[in-house]
Image (spheres, rainbow, N blue to C red):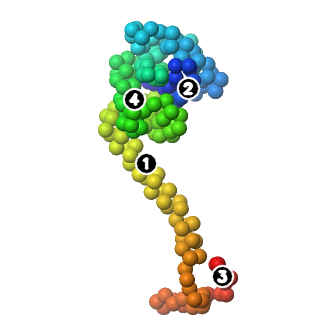
Amino acid sequence: MIKAILIFNNHGKPRLSKFYEHYSEDTEQQIIRETFHLVSKRDENVCNFLEGGMLIGGSENKLIYRHYATLYFVFCVDSSESELGILDLIQVFVETLDKCFENVCELDLIFHVDKVHNILAEMVMGGMVLETNMNEIIMQVDAQNKMEKSEAGIAGAPARAVSAVKNMNLPEMPRNINIGDISIKVPNLPSFK
């Protein structure tokens, strides 16, 4: 099971943190600092997994990471997860970000944190891997973006309706509205303009 997913820059500034176990905010910050310290001091030519820090479970858990340009992508996992499988998952995550943001950089993670979390939620939920097919992930993220855009249109509909009524050029307010067998008498209303 995945315990946490952390992304931080070369200076240890967290750019994304997702914990799948409950920790207090102070403990989460300590885990991020400890993880950065463990990962950043390692040489580039050593393997990309090591035992977890004391705060995240010690030798029972592993830190699996990749370092891309200015960012560290770190997955904290228990002993049941495959190191190579998680390395592959990190690769899929980074390639998906790269496709969604067209050459992803640290600023994309800062300014589009909601989209990054949506991408991550398509891949991992509750600490379990859901999807590893990059095309499927991108298709779901695109569908979600289309739905958000259509909902934004619906949310603005009442304002557009009021604006349309205000801009109607009626010579006078109708006094009776007849719809089939129903006749509605309209009271005297003040002008919209």
Q: Which residue is mark 3?
A: 191
Q: Where, quadrant-wise, is the C terminus in this rendering?
A: bottom right
- Please report the residue visible at 48 percent of the width from the left and 91 percent of the height from the top: 181
Under circle 4, the secondary element is: helix
Residue 53 quadrant: top right
Q: Which residue is mark 4?
A: 94
Type of amino acid at the residue the image marks with label 1: Asn
Residue 150 at x, y percent in the picture? 45, 57
Gap between marks 4 and 2 measured at Cα? 16 Å
> In this rendering, is residue 160 above or below 12?
below
Gap between marks 1 and 4 measured at Cα? 19 Å
Type of amino acid at the residue the image marks with label 2: Pro
Gap between marks 3 and 1 measured at Cα? 40 Å
Q: Is residue 122 visible?
A: no
> In this rendering, is residue 113 above or below 151?
above
- Please report the residue visible at 61 percent of the width from the left and 22 percent of the height from the top: 29
Q: Which residue is mark 1?
A: 145
Q: Earlier in the sequence, mark 4 or mark 3?
A: 4
- Please report the residue visible at 42 percent of the width from the left and 47 percent of the height from the top: 144
Residue 40 at x, y percent in the picture? 51, 13
- Report the disc number at residue 14: 2
Q: Earlier in the sequence, mark 3 or mark 1?
A: 1
Type of amino acid at the residue the image marks with label 3: Ser
- Please report the residue visible at 34 percent of the width from the left and 18 percent of the height from the top: 84
Gap between marks 4 and 3 measured at Cα? 58 Å
Mark 3 vs 1: CB contact within 8 A: no
Q: Quick one: label 1, few (<14), some, or many (20+) residues within 10 Å?
A: some
Q: Is residue 27 visible?
A: yes
Under circle 2, the secondary element is: strand
Q: Earlier in the sequence, mark 3 or mark 2?
A: 2
